[in-house]
Image (spheres, rainbow, N blue to C red):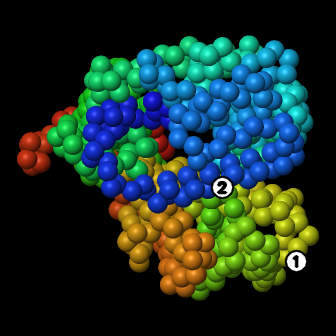
Amino acid sequence: MDARALIGCRHRLHLDAAHPEALVGISDDPGVRQRREAATAHRTKVRDTLVAAAPDAWVVIDPGLRAAERAEATMRACAAGAQRIWGGLLPQELDTGRRGGSEILLRDPDRGGYVPIIVVNHKVTDPRQPEPADFHPTTSDPYHWHPQPDPHRKLRPQPRDQQRLAHLHRMLQRHGLASPALVGGVIGYHFDRILVHDLGPLLADYDQRYADRIAVVRGELPTAPSKVPECRQCPWWKRGIEGPSCEDRLIERRDVSLVAPGSRAEVLRGHGVETIDDLASWAGPDPEDWQHGPFDEAVVTARAWITGAPLVRRVESVRVRRADVEVDVDLESFQEYGAYLWGTLLDGVYRPFVTWDPLPTDDEGRSFGEFWTWLMTVRAEAAAAGKTFAAYCYSRTAEDKWLYESARRFAGRPGVPTVDQVRAFVDGPQWVDMFQAVSDQFICPNGKGLKKIAPVAGFAWRDPEAGGEASMSWYRLAVGYDGAPDLTQRTRLLEYNEDDVRATQVLREWMTRRADVEVPGLADFGQVPDLRPDGSLRGYAVLPPLAPSLGRGGTIAT
């Protein structure tokens, strides 16, 4: 078992280990495959750059060797005192079940032994202005190991990275090769620093977690399905092997994780709440260990699931900021390489600003500059005509990220704004996040994504496969990463992006005109239907009212 099994679903781990033959021929989800390919490319770039800077300091283990040969080569390099080892694979431990390797094994220059350093394709820190703080993460230059508190960085917690480092430390420790410093490092996407983790406080949790997971693999501990984010890409979610599929089993027993997935379900089970009906009929004070937002909302979510309501109104009257001139905006990006498409909708006309040069490309700066210039021109013309203006997106996190990143990367190019200009716009009232408007005014039992919410307003995407993960595959074909460019996929991406901006417009109009009438409010959930096993209505169970603070639109009536 490697460190990946430490973070994720225990039941999936059991099924994978017990029925490996059932996975033969099942391909990875396209999004998973693309992320894996991107991670491999990133690690190759880091390896080539670091080794080229000091070739005499490195021992590179041949990745083409068999696993046992790689492990032998790694142990020989460690015994010889190699300063830096790339691609080290540690011997598999037959008694404990551990296996694993580290992109870098760095010999501790002060204390001896080796520090494991892993290379990942996600962010591990964010830049920040130097400021006094109670905690500064420790970082080191990638080329010269010298860990120091770093006031220029703030930490992005990644438990999976920490568990993997603890796993590698225990494997090194077995052979007397672990540095006494009890640290490990991570090189993230930007490859600018090594984030250094103190492994001492992590080892007890790691040991407990590993003991649990290896017992699951060996069939010594029982497991049961429970809905977690991982289910979206799991081959067992809709595929039965030990009876019905995970999804069918959860629906059959009306499992509470269907409305309170992940750690929320674990908390609820600790209070005897096993089913959606248990949660819907909760009476008494909120659980003291509930740390997932207002507990009353979890109860309402359960009641809404039972009645089949896709949304519940928190407020008496739904409101959305409106303007005389309204522009809808949606971007498409590829991994961390850049944003290749900024789609807009104004007065019913869709305008894309796009580059089809494969990312990364300088032409991205041209398309971004043209988009920003057009958007600011529309805003200025509205102001000159005495009209109000607003631009709308759905979940501004991605748009904000690529607005700032593009402004930094393409500074000085025609039409490209400064970072301060971007900040002034996104922090102002004219940049409206429809996701926030939905979150503030609705409880969403089925999720808050645009693909979940817009259909309630009556919108449908033209492409039945429309989605962020699928668009990554379309993009690879559209720009010719793996062959000649496929122009039909460019059309597909443009239509997908156009549908996204049209969806935000339809959602806004619906929230303004019809949502008050079509969506039940909190006061409608004081009773829950008592259903027979065949789904027919037996009657209604009267439930206690929810707290008055739940919504400005009123409390649940009993």
Which mark, by number, is residue 414? 1
SS at badge 2: helix
Residue drawn at point x = 68 percent, y = 18 percent: 177
Q: Image check: 17 left or right of 532?
A: right
Residue drawn at point x = 59 percent, y = 86 percent: 349
> Of tags 1 and 2, which is closer to the observer?
2
CB atoms at circles 1 and 2 under 8 Å apart?
no
Tell me where residue 116 sits by quadrant: top right
Which mark, by number, is residue 461? none
Residue drawn at point x = 80 percent, y = 45 percent: 51
Looking at the image, residue 358 lies above or below residue 150? below
As rendered, which of 92 and 257 lies closer to the eye? 92
- The spot of residue 534 in percent (x, y) is 8, 47
- The spot of residue 6 in percent (x, y) is 48, 29
Q: Amino acid at mark 2?
A: Ala
As rendered, which of 211 and 342 lies closer to the eye? 211
SS at badge 1: loop
Looking at the image, residue 198 lies above or below residue 334? above
Residue drawn at point x = 50 percent, y = 56 percent: 33
- Residue at label 2? 41
